[in-house]
Image (spheres, grey):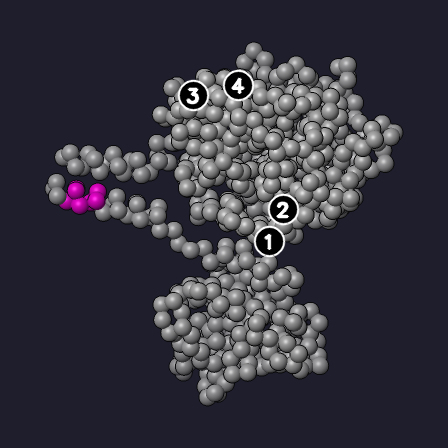
C-alpha cells in the first residue's frame, strides 16, 4: 500500500496544473467607477508626483485614466482635458523622464487610423504646478509631430546619461525617435538609422545584447528589429541573431530572464502564430518555447512577472476574444502551464495589461484593459499567495532622481542569478511599474542585488532583510 | 488487485513522464523560423525547389524529410498549414513514361493540376541519418536558357548562367527537383480512374489545363507554368 501512496503523490506532483487550479483572485471590485469602454495600453508611473504609482489607462475615444490606490480602492484621479483627451484615441503609452527633472513625462500615442497618415498627433504630457501640459503643443516642439498611425512606445536612454528618448513604433510610416535637443523635442530617428517603415507593433528596450539600452521591436508584415546600441547609435541585427521572424505578425513582447542565469532574453508573441521564447546562445537567439507555450493564439500583451512570490516568473498571455493563458518558467526554460480559473476571460477583448504592487503589500496586481471592437470594463487580479511567502522589491533611481527605466536588476542568492528589467515599455502598447519585483524561493539565502545602470556601470548591494522595497540611487 | 493497481500507476507515471519529456518536433515552426534563410530576398514565387534543397541539406532522418516536405507547395513556394490534406494524383515518370501515383501537398487546388501537367517524376535515392532511402520527386527541366523566364521569379535561385544553380536548388539528372511525391508508386488502374474522375484532379484540372495561359488567374500557377513549360 505504501508503494501505491508514493506513486499517487508522485503523480500529483507531475501534474502541477491540477494543484494550481485557482491561481488568481478577481479583485475587479476594487476599481471604483468601472464602465464599459475601449481601453488599450496601460502604463505605471507616478503621474501626480506624490511618490505613489498610478495605472495610466488609455482610452480609444474614451478618457485616459489615472487609477490611484486609495483606501483599498482604485480611483481615477485624471480630470484635466489635455490628459483625459477623449478626442484623440490613445492606444500606446509609456512614461520616462525626458526633460531630466526627476519626474516622468507620459507619452500618449494616439492613432485615429489603422495605418499611414493620421489626423491627430501624439502627446507628451508634463506636470507643472499641478497643471498638465502637452509639450508638443508648445510652438518650438511643433516641427516633428508624429502624424503616422502607431502602436507602442518605449523609453530609451541610448547614451546612458539619463536623457531618455522615445521610440515610437509606427504603422505604415517611419518609426520616430524623440529626444530633447537644445531645449526642443526633435525626431532623431533618421540620424540614428531608426526611421524604417514597417507595421510596428510592440517594442522593448534594455540590456539585450550590450551593456547599453538595446531595442527589440516586434513588427507585422515585415521583419522584427533588434537594434544593437553602439555607443548611442543603432544597428539592426535581427537577421544575424535569428529573431527577425519575417512571416509572423509580432505582438506582445517582454524581456525575461528565462533561464535564471543573470541576463535578459526575449519573449515575443505572434498574432495567431508561434509565440517565441528567445534565449541567447553564443551569437544567436534560440527559441526554446515548448508546444504548449508557442501554440498560436490571438495574442496581445505578454507580461513576465512573479505574481505568486514563489521565486519563479510567470508569463501572462493576454489574448483577444480567446482565453488568456499563464505559464510558470521553471528551471532550464521549462514553461509549465498553469490552468487558470480566474483571469481566463473567454470573451475578453484584451488589448493591454500591466503589473504593479499598487497597494504596496508585496504582491503584484495585474490590471487588464479591454476594448478593441467591444466596449468592456477593466479587470484586476491578484495571485493567491502562500502566507509564508516573502518578496524583495528593488527600485533603481537614476542620477536625476527618476525611475531608471532600462536598467537591469539581478538578484544573486544561493539558488539563482535572476535578472529583471526596469521596464521601459513592454507587453503590447504597455509599460510595467519601474520596480524589480522578486518572490523568494524556499530555503533561499545570501541575498545580494546588482543594479546595472543604463550607462553599463553596476552597483552591488547586500540585502539584510526581505519583504521590503529597496530604493537604489545612481551615484 | 494490489498488483494490478501497482502496475496501472507505474504505467501511468511512466506515460506522464514520457509525455512531458518527449516533445514532438515542430516542423512547421522550424520552416517559419528559417524562412528568411531560405528566401533571403523574401521572394518565394515558384520557389518550391528552394524548400526541397533546404530540407534535404539538413542532417535529418527520413521521417523528418517526409514531414518537412508536407509543408510547402512545390508549385507556388507557399507554406502549407500543418493539418492540410493532400491531393491524390499522378504524374509521368520521365524514364518510363509510366503514371506514378501518390500524395501531393498543395497550397491551392490549381497547383495540383499544374504539377500533373508540367512536372515529371523521377526516382531518387538519398542517404539520411537512418539509412539510404528511395522515393519519387517532382522535377522540371532546366529553365535557365528560357527567353521568357518569368519576371516574378528570382532567377538566381534557380540558375547560374544557363546552368542549374546547385548551391540553391537540387539537381537530378540535369533537371530541378521541385518537391516530393509522397507515397509514390506505380498507379493501379482504379487509382488512375479515381484521379480522372475526382472533382479536382479530374474535372477541374481538365478545365484548367485546357485554358490558355493568358486566361489563367488563379493561384501562383501561371508563374510556375511559365517556368516549367
Query: Alpha carbon of mark 3 to alpha carbon of mark 2: how far?
Result: 36 Å
Quarter of the figure with residue A16: top left
Q: Chain of mark 2?
A: A
- Badge 1 element: loop
Looking at the image, which residue sits at the far bottom? Answer: B96
**Residue for point 70% across, 26% down:** A97
Q: Are marks 1 and 2 in contact (CB under 8 Å)?
A: no
**From what the image shows, is residue B37 above or below residue B221?**
above
**Residue for point 30% across, 45% down:** B16
Classed neighbour count for the residue bearing mark 2: other residues with Cα under 10 Å, few (<14), some (14–19), many (≥20):
many
Q: In terms of secondary structure, what is the magenta stretch mainly?
A: helix
For residue A226, the mark is 2
Q: Please give the range of residues in magenta.
A: B4-10
Q: Are marks 3 and 2 in contact (CB under 8 Å)?
A: no
x, y percent for residue B69: 48, 66
Quarter of the figure with residue A176: top right
Which of disc 3 and disc 4 is earlier in sequence? 3
- Badge 3 element: loop
Which of disc 2 and disc 3 is earlier in sequence? 2
For residue A240, the mark is 1
| A397 horizontally vs A442: left or right | right
Amino acid at each position: 500500500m505504501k508503494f501505491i501512496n508514493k506513486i499517487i503523490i508522485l503523480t500529483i506532483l507531475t501534474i502541477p496544473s491540477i494543484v494550481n487550479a485557482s491561481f488568481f483572485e478577481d479583485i475587479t471590485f476594487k476599481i471604483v467607477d468601472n464602465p464599459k469602454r475601449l481601453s488599450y495600453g496601460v502604463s505605471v508611473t507616478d503621474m501626480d508626483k506624490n511618490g505613489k504609482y498610478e495605472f495610466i489607462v488609455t482610452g480609444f475615444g474614451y478618457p485616459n485614466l489615472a487609477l490611484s490606490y486609495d483606501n483599498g480602492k482604485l480611483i481615477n484621479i485624471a480630470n484635466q482635458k489635455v490628459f483625459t483627451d477623449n478626442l484623440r484615441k490613445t492606444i500606446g503609452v509609456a512614461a520616462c523622464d525626458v526633460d531630466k527633472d526627476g519626474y516622468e513625462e507620459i507619452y500618449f500615442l494616439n492613432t485615429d487610423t489603422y495605418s499611414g497618415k493620421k489626423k491627430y498627433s501624439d502627446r507628451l504630457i508634463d506636470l507643472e504646478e499641478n497643471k498638465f501640459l502637452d509639450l508638443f503643443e508648445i510652438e518650438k516642439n511643433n516641427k516633428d509631430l508624429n502624424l503616422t498611425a502607431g502602436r507602442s512606445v518605449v523609453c530609451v536612454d541610448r547614451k546612458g546619461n539619463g536623457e531618455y528618448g522615445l521610440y515610437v513604433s509606427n504603422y505604415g510610416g517611419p518609426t520616430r525617435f524623440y529626444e530633447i535637443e537644445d531645449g526642443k523635442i526633435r525626431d532623431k530617428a533618421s540620424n540614428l538609422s531608426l526611421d524604417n517603415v514597417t507595421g510596428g507593433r510592440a517594442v522593448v528596450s534594455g540590456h539585450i545584447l550590450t551593456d547599453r539600452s538595446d531595442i527589440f521591436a516586434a513588427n507585422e508584415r515585415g521583419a522584427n528589429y533588434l537594434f544593437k546600441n553602439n555607443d548611442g547609435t543603432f544597428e539592426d541585427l535581427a537577421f544575424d541573431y535569428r529573431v527577425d521572424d519575417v512571416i509572423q505578425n509580432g505582438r506582445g513582447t517582454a524581456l525575461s530572464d528565462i533561464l535564471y542565469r543573470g541576463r535578459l532574453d526575449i519573449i515575443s508573441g505572434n498574432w495567431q502564430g508561434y509565440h517565441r521564447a528567445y534565449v541567447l546562445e553564443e551569437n544567436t537567439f534560440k527559441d526554446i518555447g515548448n508546444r504548449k507555450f508557442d501554440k498560436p493564439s490571438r495574442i496581445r500583451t505578454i507580461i513576465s512577472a512573479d505574481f505568486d512570490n514563489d521565486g519563479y516568473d510567470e508569463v501572462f498571455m493576454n489574448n483577444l476574444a480567446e482565453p488568456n493563458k499563464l505559464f510558470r518558467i521553471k528551471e532550464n526554460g521549462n514553461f509549465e502551464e498553469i490552468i487558470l480559473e480566474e483571469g481566463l476571460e473567454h470573451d475578453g477583448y484584451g488589448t493591454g495589461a500591466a503589473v504593479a504592487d499598487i497597494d504596496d503589500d508585496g504582491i503584484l496586481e495585474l490590471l487588464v484593459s479591454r476594448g478593441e471592437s467591444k466596449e468592456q470594463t477593466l479587470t484586476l487580479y491578484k495571485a493567491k499567495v502562500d502566507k509564508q511567502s516573502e518578496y524583495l522589491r528593488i527600485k533603481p533611481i537614476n542620477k536625476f532622481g527618476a525611475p531608471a527605466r532600462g536598467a537591469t536588476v539581478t538578484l544573486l542568492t544561493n539558488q539563482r542569478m535572476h535578472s529583471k528589467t526596469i521596464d521601459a515599455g513592454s507587453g503590447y502598447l504597455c509599460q510595467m511599474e519601474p520596480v524589480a519585483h522578486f518572490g523568494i524561493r524556499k530555503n533561499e539565502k545570501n541575498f545580494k542585488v546588482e543594479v546595472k545602470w543604463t550607462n553599463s556601470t553596476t552597483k552591488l548591494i547586500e540585502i539584510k532583510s526581505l519583504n521590503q522595497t529597496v530604493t537604489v540611487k545612481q551615484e | 488487485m494490489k498488483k494490478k493497481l501497482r502496475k496501472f500507476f507505474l504505467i501511468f507515471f511512466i506515460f506522464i513522464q514520457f509525455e512531458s519529456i518527449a516533445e514532438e518536433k515542430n516542423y512547421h515552426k522550424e520552416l517559419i523560423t528559417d524562412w528568411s534563410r531560405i528566401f533571403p530576398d523574401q521572394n518565394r514565387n515558384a520557389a518550391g525547389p528552394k524548400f526541397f534543397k533546404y530540407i534535404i541539406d539538413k542532417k535529418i532522418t527520413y521521417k523528418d524529410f517526409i514531414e518537412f516536405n508536407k509543408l510547402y507547395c512545390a508549385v507556388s513556394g507557399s507554406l502549407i498549414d500543418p493539418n492540410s490534406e493532400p491531393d491524390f494524383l499522378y504524374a509521368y515518370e520521365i524514364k518510363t513514361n509510366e503514371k506514378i501515383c501518390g500524395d501531393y501537398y498543395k497550397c491551392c487546388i490549381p497547383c495540383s493540376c499544374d504539377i500533373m501537367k508540367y512536372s515529371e517524376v523521377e526516382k531518387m535515392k538519398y542517404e539520411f541519418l537512418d539509412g539510404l532511402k528511395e522515393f519519387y520527386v517532382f522535377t522540371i527541366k532546366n529553365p535557365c536558357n528560357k527567353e521568357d523566364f518569368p519576371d516574378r521569379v528570382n532567377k538566381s535561385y534557380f540558375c547560374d548562367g544557363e546552368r542549374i544553380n546547385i548551391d540553391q536548388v537540387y539537381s537530378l539528372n540535369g533537371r530541378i527537383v521541385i518537391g516530393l511525391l509522397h507515397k509514390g508508386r506505380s498507379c493501379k488502374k482504379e487509382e488512375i480512374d479515381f484521379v480522372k474522375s475526382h472533382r479536382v484532379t479530374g474535372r477541374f484540372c481538365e478545365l484548367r489545363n485546357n485554358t490558355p495561359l493568358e486566361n489563367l488567374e488563379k493561384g501562383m500557377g501561371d508563374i510556375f507554368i511559365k517556368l516549367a513549360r
